[in-house]
Amino acid sequence: MFMRMCALEKMAPEKLAEAAEMLKTLAHPVRLQIVDLIHSAESLPVGAISERLGLAQAAASQHLNHMRRVGLLKSERQGKEVWYSVADERPIALLNCLCNCCGING
C-alpha cells in the first residue's frame, strides 16, 4: 500500500507544468543513467560520460544540452572540456525512489 505524499490539486499550474517537463526530460534511459553517473562523480566532462556509458560523444552532448536547457544540469568550461554537474537535486530523489521501488540498493 502506498501513502499519498502530496495533493496535486493543491499545486499551482506552473509547478505542475515544471514537474511534467522534468519527468518528460528524464523519461529516457540514457538520461537517467547520465544523471546517476554525474551525481555519483559530482561532475564529469562530456568525454568521460560518453566513454563510461558507451555513447558517441555527439549523442551524449545532445542529452546533456537538453538537460542543461531545462535546468536539471549545469555546465562549466574548464579549458577545452565542458564539465557537467547536477543543478537540480529533484531528479536524484526520483532516482532513489525508482531504486527503492525496484528493490535495488545503492
Image: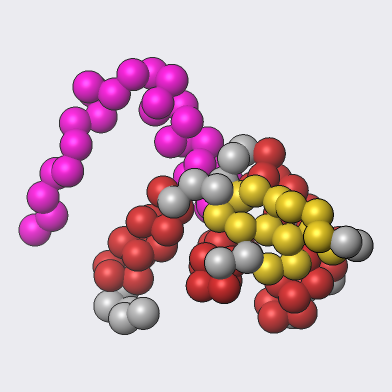
Where does residue 56 sit, x and y in percent of width and height? Answer: 83, 71
Q: Position of residue 88 (x, y in %)?
A: 49, 47
Q: Nearer the viewer, residue 84 or 30?
A: 84
Please state if 95 lies on the left or on the right of 32 as rendered: left
Is residue 14 on the magenta stretch? yes
Residue 52 in the image, given as x and y percentages of width and height: 69, 80
Residue 99 in the image, given as x and y percentages of width and height: 35, 71
Identity of the residue drawn at 74% across and 48% down: 65
Left or right: where 91 falls relative to 99:
right
Magenta segment boundaries in residue numbering? 1-29
Which residue occupies 56% across, 62% down? Answer: 35
Compared to residue 28, the image places residue 72 above or below, namely above
Q: Is residue 37 magenta?
A: no
Q: Main secondary structure of the magenta part?
A: helix
Apparent side of residue 100 relative to residue 76 in the rendered image (left or right): left
- Residue that protrudes farthest toward the top in the picture: 13
* Residue 44 in view in this figure: yes
- Taking the view exactly as shown, the residue that stands out farthest to the right is 80
Name the quadrant containing residue 10.
top left
| Relative height, residue 5 to residue 54 (above, below) | above
What residue do we see at 31% from left, 61% from top? 97
